[in-house]
């Protein structure tokens, strides 16, 4: 009995000490996107104040491509000590349905650290297209089935799956043209070589205001302050176009809970800093507060939802 109590106390104090002694070296956040994308901007915005609090630099290492699986694989194989995290997004929820032989499970092999933000997306088309509303886009797609081409940040990325969800709702088909990141796609759409992308509003809004892109709907339940003239999907008559694009940090599953909890607490405090709040307001994104356990459950549920989309769209793992 005494030995058992001793072992329990030893494990408890050892775990607590692990959290207290963290971090012991620079932190590396491996990102699934490319520099300049929404998740990259948000990661850097939070990384600065967090670095000051932890007393260690935070390095954002973007490894975009293959729907985020390259970055996820790197973090999965890393030492589970909290110094290497995955800066990911909604793309995480689609990985298991789109890629065979991953070598890891996108849900069970990771532990939620902190959900960083919820980002509204906007459906953008070239100004050259004569589409004033989302119904015009649907009519054009139905007039020439399979003739339109849309861009995405890679097969299985959130930009890919959200377009698939919208096409299912609209009853149309088109061709996905995958890129490593969304910034390149926006250029292709702006010049008219691609027909659309459903992309986080934070990076598309400036181009819409400049007239380089045309916004037809936003994915949120309410119009965005930075894009007041763009209707919501429901207002445009296509409520199925609503979706939740999230950004968050995951750790390898075997990372000590004390370290995960410390990271979560420090990130929560960093999110409350005036500089971060101002950046969020500028980008038009919202905080997405939840505990690590709640984030785990959220990721699992979102993965199930994405599975239904890929099944309905008849997308098979590659």
Image (cartoon, rainbow, N blue to C red):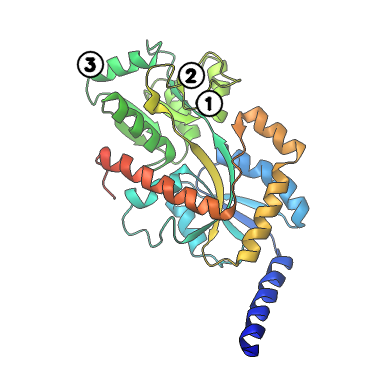
Q: Secondary structure at mark 3?
A: helix
Mark 2 neighbour density, 10 Å: few (under 14) some (14–19) many (20 or more): many
- Can residue 78 be spotted in the picture? yes
Reply above or below: 295 against 251: above
The residue identified by callout 2 is: 213
Query: Picture quarter containing residue 169?
Result: top left
Residue 298 lies left or right of residue 281; in this view the side is: left
Q: Earlier in the sequence, mark 3 or mark 2?
A: 3
Percent coordinates x, y for residue 313 in the rendering: 27, 37
Distance of mark 3 from mark 2, alpha carbons? 23 Å
Percent coordinates x, y for residue 202 in the rendering: 57, 29
Distance of mark 1 from mark 3, alpha carbons? 27 Å
Residue 82 lies left or right of residue 64; in this view the side is: right
Q: Are marks 2 and 1 in contact (CB under 8 Å)?
A: yes
- Number of numbered discs on residues: 3
The residue identified by callout 1 is: 204
Mark 3 neighbour density, 10 Å: few (under 14) some (14–19) many (20 or more): few
Judge depth for marks 3 and 2 and give the one in front.
Answer: 3
Distance of mark 2 from mark 1, alpha carbons? 8 Å
Q: Earlier in the sequence, mark 2 or mark 1?
A: 1
Mark 1 neighbour density, 10 Å: few (under 14) some (14–19) many (20 or more): many
Percent coordinates x, y for residue 257 in the rendering: 61, 65
* Front-lying residue, 304 or 58: 304
- Can residue 67 be spotted in the picture? no
The residue shown at (73%, 47%) is 269
The residue identified by callout 3 is: 143
The residue shown at (58%, 22%) is 206
């Amino acid at each position: 009995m005494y030995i058992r109590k001793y072992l329990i106390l030893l494990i408890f104090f050892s775990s607590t000490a692990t959290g207290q002694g963290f971090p012991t070296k620079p932190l590396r956040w491996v990102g699934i996107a490319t520099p300049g994308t929404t998740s990259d901007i948000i990661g850097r915005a939070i990384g600065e104040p967090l670095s000051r609090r932890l007393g260690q630099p935070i390095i954002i290492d973007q490894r975009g491509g293959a729907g985020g699986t390259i970055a996820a694989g790197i973090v999965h194989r890393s030492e589970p000590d909290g110094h290497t995290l995955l800066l990911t997004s909604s793309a995480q929820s689609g990985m298991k349905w789109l890629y065979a032989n991953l070598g890891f499970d996108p849900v069970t092999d990771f532990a939620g650290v902190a959900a960083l933000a919820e980002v509204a997306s906007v459906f953008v088309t070239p100004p050259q297209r004569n589409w004033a509303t989302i119904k015009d886009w649907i009519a054009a797609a139905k007039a020439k089935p399979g003739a339109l081409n849309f861009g995405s940040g890679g097969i299985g990325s959130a930009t890919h799956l959200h377009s698939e969800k919208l096409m299912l709702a609209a009853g149309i088909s088109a061709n996905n043209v995958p890129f490593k990141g969304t910034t390149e796609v926006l250029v292709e759409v702006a010049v008219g070589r691609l027909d659309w992308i459903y992309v986080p509003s934070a990076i598309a809004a400036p181009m819409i205001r400049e007239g380089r892109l045309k916004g037809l709907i936003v994915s949120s339940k309410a119009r965005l302050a930075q894009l007041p003239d763009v209707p919501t999907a429901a207002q445009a008559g296509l409520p199925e176009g609503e979706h939740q694009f999230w950004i968050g940090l995951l750790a390898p599953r075997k990372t000590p809970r004390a370290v995960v909890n410390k990271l979560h607490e420090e990130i929560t405090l960093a999110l409350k800093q005036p500089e971060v709040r101002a950046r969020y307001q500028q980008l038009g994104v919202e905080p997405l507060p939840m505990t690590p356990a709640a984030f785990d459950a959220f990721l699992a549920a979102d993965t199930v939802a994405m599975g239904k989309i890929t099944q309905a769209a008849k997308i098979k793992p590659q």
